[in-house]
Image (spheres, rainbow, N blue to C red):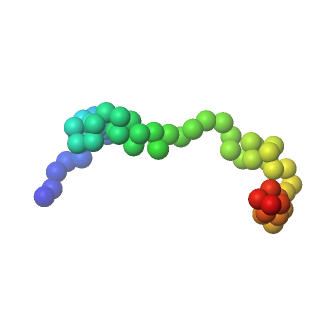
Amino acid sequence: MTTAPAPLAEITQSAIRLLCREYGLVNTARFLNQFSHGYGNYTEERDEILGDQTVEDVIVEIKRLRK
């Protein structure tokens, strides 16, 4: 079957309608939320939180906290 590509906005609308019909509004919202791009700068935040810690340092700290 060969069809011309539909505009992305049209595909999105159709897909959301289909999801709502098949899974309900709440589950559709939950599904779509997993594709959120989030916010902020992950690299800067990670560096601010972890600093110069290595993976090994983090593992040691996790093991320490579990005791």
- Looking at the rendered image, the quarter that the N terminus falls into is bottom left
Q: Residue at x 53, y 40 (%)?
A: 37
Q: Position of residue 56 (x, y in %)?
A: 81, 66
Q: Position of residue 19 (x, y in %)?
A: 27, 41
Q: Position of residue 66 (x, y in %)?
A: 77, 59
- Looking at the rendered image, the quarter that the C terminus falls into is bottom right
Q: Quadrant of residue 48?
A: top right
User: Is residue 54 in view from this perspective?
Assistant: no
Q: Nearer the viewer, residue 40 or 56?
A: 56
Q: In the displayed image of the protein, which residue is found farthest to the front?
A: 67
Q: Is residue 50 left or right of residue 6?
A: right
- Count all numbered tags in the image, as a single digit: 0
Q: Position of residue 14 (x, y in %)?
A: 24, 38
Q: Residue at x 23, y 42 (%)?
A: 22
Q: Residue at x 34, y 38 (%)?
A: 28
Q: Is residue 27 left or right of residue 67?
A: left
Q: Residue at x 22, y 37 (%)?
A: 21
Q: Quadrant of residue 55?
A: bottom right
Q: Quadrant of residue 18?
A: top left
Q: In the displayed image of the protein, which residue is found farthest to the right?
A: 52
From the viewer's perspective, is residue 37 above or below residue 64? above
From the viewer's perspective, is residue 32 above or below residue 53? above
